[in-house]
Image: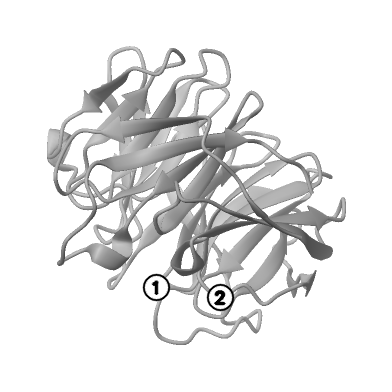
């Protein structure tokens, strides 16, 4: 179950205090976009492996980036972390198309997933609310009250990574501090706990999914866990655990062709001495 893997390639991000948090991949070009939690810089890793700054820190008032995703329309979505915001950008020009605010503090707008109709669903690790965003108006609204649905909400980081289930009818999100996984019905907003064999997975962070395989970045353990998910997301089983010398507090994962991109956030070294350079590692995208 536990395997040590080697990096196929390692991409270096320029800067002494990047602390990258997430990564999103453009399905057509294969370009990957990585955001800095520390200052809001957005980096691009092109398909050929070149690394450049797509948008500098502070552009448009952006000071932090957590989750990064790209929709089918080719727009770049960034979660604003502790700023409590969500931004949407046009890729070609880098112009800001829309900015939303969750309207509550403290906030940690953390990650994004898209439904079959392109509606965006957004987690906030501090607010017990799941938000959704209309893909046309880009208006954000509260959608599911997680506390009302019985999801425990202790101090610390709660809901984090989020993905669409194989049946296209539910979302799965992980709860970082408890290591529990929750399933949310797109039709009703009903929340149920995922029966996770091999869990709980405390320190679970970013998620990616391919078919029935869910890739889970487990940051403080320096591991990527692969779980087999049932089509409706009601059950899951951890079947493989990947470790590597190329991992450094991995906070997010994304699939690019047959590779898995792993963001080495080093968030455990914020305020101390990170190991430079900050990196994103590419490993073979094994299946569960």
In the image, residue 26 lies at what x, y percent? 51, 23
Residue 69 makes an appearance in the image = no
- The answer to whether 203 is drawn above or below residue 32 in the figure is below
Q: Secondary structure at mark 1?
A: loop
Distance from disc 1 to disc 2, alpha carbons, whole Å, reads: 16 Å
In the image, residue 222 lies at what x, y percent? 48, 61
Q: Nearer the viewer, residue 145 or 62?
A: 62
Q: Earlier in the sequence, mark 1 or mark 2?
A: 1
Q: Nearer the viewer, residue 230 or 245?
A: 245
The residue drawn where x is 20% and y is 52% is 38
In the image, residue 98 lies at what x, y percent? 32, 35
Residue 118 placement, left or right of 193 = left
Q: Do tag 1 and tag 2 residues touch (Cβ < 8 Å)?
A: no
Q: Residues within 10 Å of mark 1 (few under 14, many from 20)?
A: many
Q: Say which residue label 1 marks.
A: 126
- The answer to whether 199 is drawn above or below residue 80 in the figure is below
Residue 150 figure quarter: bottom right
In the image, residue 230 lies at what x, y percent? 87, 55
- Figure quadrant of the N terminus: bottom right
Q: Say which residue label 2 marks.
A: 202
Q: Residues within 10 Å of mark 2 (few under 14, many from 20)?
A: some
Q: Nearer the viewer, residue 209 or 224?
A: 224
Residue 163 makes an appearance in the image = yes
Residue 56 figure quarter: top left
Residue 35 figure quarter: top left
- Frontmost of labels 1 and 2 is 2
Q: Nearer the viewer, residue 14 or 234?
A: 14
Q: Which mark is residue 72?
A: none
The residue drawn where x is 38% and y is 58% is 109
Q: Secondary structure at mark 2?
A: loop
The residue drawn where x is 15% and y is 39% is 15
């Amino acid at each position: 179950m536990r395997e040590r893997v080697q990096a196929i390639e390692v991409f270096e991000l320029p800067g002494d205090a990047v602390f990258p948090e997430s990564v999103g991949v453009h399905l057509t070009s294969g370009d990957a976009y990585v955001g800095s939690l520390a200052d809001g810089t957005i980096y691009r890793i092109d398909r050929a492996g070149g690394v450049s700054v797509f948008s500098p820190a502070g552009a448009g008032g952006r000071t932090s980036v957590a989750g990064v995703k790209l929709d089918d329309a080719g727009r770049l979505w960034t979660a604003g972390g502790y700023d409590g915001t969500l931004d949407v950008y046009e890729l070609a020009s880098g112009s800001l198309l829309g900015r939303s605010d969750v309207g509550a503090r403290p906030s940690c707008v953390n990650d994004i997933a898209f439904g079959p109709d392109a509606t965006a669903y957004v987690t906030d690790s501090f607010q017990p609310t799941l938000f959704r965003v209309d893909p046309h108006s880009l208006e954000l609204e509260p959608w599911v009250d997680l506390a009302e649905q019985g999801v425990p909400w202790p101090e610390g980081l709660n809901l984090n990574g989020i993905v669409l289930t194989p049946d296209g009818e539910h979302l799965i999100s992980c709860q970082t501090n408890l290591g529990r996984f929750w399933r949310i019905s797109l039709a009703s907003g009903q929340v149920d706990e995922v029966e996770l064999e091999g869990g709980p997975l405390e320190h679970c962070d970013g998620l990616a999914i391919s078919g029935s395989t869910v890739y889970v970045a487990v940051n403080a353990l320096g591991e990527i866990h692969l779980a087999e998910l049932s089509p409706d997301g009601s059950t899951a089983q951890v079947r493989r655990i990947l470790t590597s010398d190329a991992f450094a507090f991995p906070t997010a994962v994304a699939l690019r062709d047959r590779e898995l991109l792993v963001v080495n956030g080093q968030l455990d070294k914020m305020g101390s001495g990170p190991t430079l350079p900050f990196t994103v590692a590419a490993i073979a995208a094994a299946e569960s």
